[in-house]
Image (cartoon, rainbow, N blue to C red):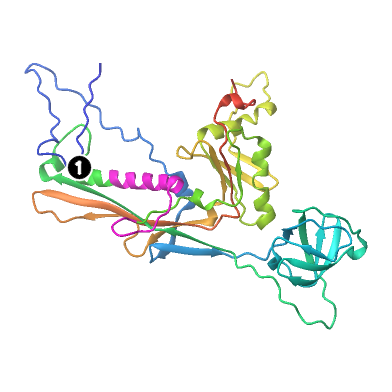
Amino acid sequence: MPATYNRPTLPGTANTYDSTTTQLSNSAVRFVLPLIESLDYKDTPLTSMIGFSKRRVDNRKVEWTDEILPAVSDTLGAGYTSGGGTITVSNGAKFQQYNVIQIDSELMLVTAISTNTLTVTTAWAGTTNANHANGAAIQIVGVAMPENTPTPPASVALGSAYNNFCQLWDKGIQISNRQNYANNYFTRTPEYEWRLKQLLTQCKREFERTLFLGVGVDATGTLPSAMSGFPQFITTNVTTLAGAAFTERQFLDALGPAFDDIGPSGLGDTVICGRFAKQVIGSWADPGRRLSGSDTAITARIDTIITDFGELDIMMHRWCPATELYFMNPKNYEICAYANYGEWHDGPLPADGEYLRGHVAGDYVLIAMGNRASAKLTGFSTSSADYSSMAA
């Protein structure tokens, strides 16, 4: 069977870089093909899609806010009986005096506010006064001010505050001067330069994984700070399926609350999912697939879906958790380097002997401003038997 040889982990003991073998004096010189460098996953599509910002940060904790307008809806905090002159709402701070509101099909005029109790003129504008259940939706239609009346204070919304932490990647290398120029089957010479390039590839790949799996934590004592990935910032519009299959209907409805909240501007336009979820989406084309007698190929892939919320591009990613699917807009995210030496860089380290020491490093943070514009389906089944549209 074929023999394999594994290069040692660096730095190793003296002479461990030697890869020669003893051969018979009359044997032929071994023929070894050049190293093939493309047999591992190096792509970082999410990093490329978001891109690196020109903005720099100068604190390991980075904070930002999203500005929102006051709410246009609330719910009843208690049931209302027809004929009453007050209603109890869940949050009285959302209202102002002389608001016109709608509960079910009845309009009311708010004439006074005391915490969560609103004094109202019922059956406003010719509508019919009726009973309304606890939890019924209240729509804030607008304001109807009487003339020559003091201006009442309006409701105010300030939005939400978010934060993330910078994360430092740093990988070192140590190679003896002999090893740096020793011929072998697995690296290029000089090996030091080749290893630095390989370390940079490792750092970028780990950064891509952190964009999915990272959970933010601040530095304490000798422990480092770490960065949250983008899923940590999608918390508002989440549909949890508890092991059930996700349907095309659920997929199309996922962005509905985000659209109702922020409108079409900045809405998530990219779907990120694992390979199983991508195959499920591709299977939705099966019922509409048509072949003629001359067709020799079929398409079993969907990369873009045109919806009422716009075009959704589908990205399959190997590191996306298998039971999660995300709707996000890359324009709402930034990858920022720490000031000065934060960008990916390499350099020498002090050496006190006949060897070379160096490292590759980068210091970055993700800024994610797309919470209310994003959505997530989570906890769905990854068994093909639960999806009738998938090929058996």
Relative to 256, residue 392 above or below: above
Can you see residue 298? no
Can you see residue 64? yes
Which residue is at a point 30% across and 54% down the rendered structure image? 361
Relative to 8, residue 62 above or below: below
- Residue 361 or 378: which is nearer the viewer? 378
Which residue is at a point 69% across and 70% down the rendered structure image? 155
Q: Quadrant of residue 17?
A: top left
Which residue is at a point 17% across and 42% down the rendered structure image? 11
> In the rendered view of the protein, which quadrant contains the C terminus?
top right
User: Residue 203 magenta-drawn?
Assistant: yes
User: Residue 257 magenta-drawn?
Assistant: no
Asked if residue 185 lies left or right of residue 44, the reply is: left
> Where residue 273 appears, x then y in whole percent?
53, 39
Q: Quadrant of residue 126?
A: bottom right
Q: Range of the magenta residues?
A: 198-224
- Residue 338 or 386: which is nearer the viewer? 386
> Where residue 6 appears, x then y in whole percent?
22, 30
> In the rendered view of the protein, which quadrant contains the N terminus?
top left
Relative to 46, residue 15 above or below: above
> Where residue 132 appears, x then y in whole percent?
82, 54
Name the residue carrying label 1.
191
Tag 1: amino acid: Glu
Q: Is disc 1 surrounded by few (<14), some (14 to 19) or many (20+) residues within 10 Å?
A: many
Which residue is at a point 19% across and 55% down the rendered structure image? 349
Instruction: Tell me how many marks there are.
Output: 1
